Amino acid sequence: LNQDRFVLYRCSILANDSGNAPVFRIEAEDDMANPVVGDSPSTAWEQLAKRFGDSSVRGSGDMCWREEMFGLTAWTVQA
């Protein structure tokens, strides 16, 4: 992981093997073999931030962009 360059991330919402709540997965284009997985958009992004030693994504002030990265703020998803 290189903090000095831009990296594209693919955010996916997948079915959980147990059939319960979905799984939120983030894959970095430079590290596709090690995806980050969480039980919510926030959890997944917090796990990614931990890889970089960044605690700035924690807290409620930036919750919206985490959901936005998974497409959950689009009106077609909310309807």
Image (cartoon, rainbow, N blue to C red):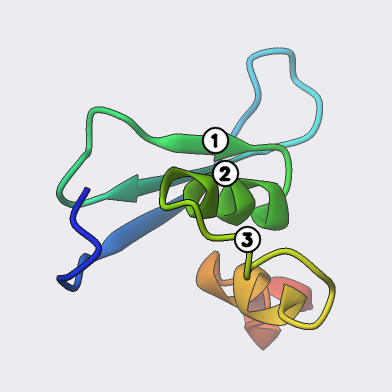
The kind of secondary structure element at disc 2 is helix
Q: CA distance from mark 3 to mark 1?
A: 17 Å
Point out residue 21 in the picture as x, y percentages from the top left corner: 79, 34
- Tell me the element at label 1: strand
Crowd class of label 1 (few under 14; some 14 to 19; many from 20; radius 10 Å): many
The image quadrant that residue 7 belongs to is bottom left
Camera-near label (3 vs 2) is: 3
Mark drawn on residue 45: none
The vertical placement of 21 against 56, above or below, is above
Q: 4 or 35, which lies in front?
A: 4
Look at label 2 and name its amino acid: Gln
Amino acid type, residue under disc 3 in the picture: Ser
Whole-percent x, y for residue 23 in the image? 63, 36
- Quadrant containing the C terminus is bottom right
From the image, state whether disc 3 or disc 1 is nearer to you.
Answer: 3
Q: Which residue is mark 2?
A: 47
Picture disc at residue 55? 3
First of labels 3, 1 by sequence position = 1
Say which residue label 1 marks: 37
Q: Are marks 3 and 2 in contact (CB under 8 Å)?
A: no
Q: Please report the residue visible at 64 percent of the width from the left and 38 percent of the height from the top.
A: 38
Q: How many marks?
A: 3
Question: Are the residues tagged 1 and 2 within 8 Å (C-beta)?
Answer: yes
On screen, residue 57 above or below 46: below
Q: Residue at x 53, y 46 (%)?
A: 50
- First reached walking from the N terminus: tag 1 or tag 2: 1
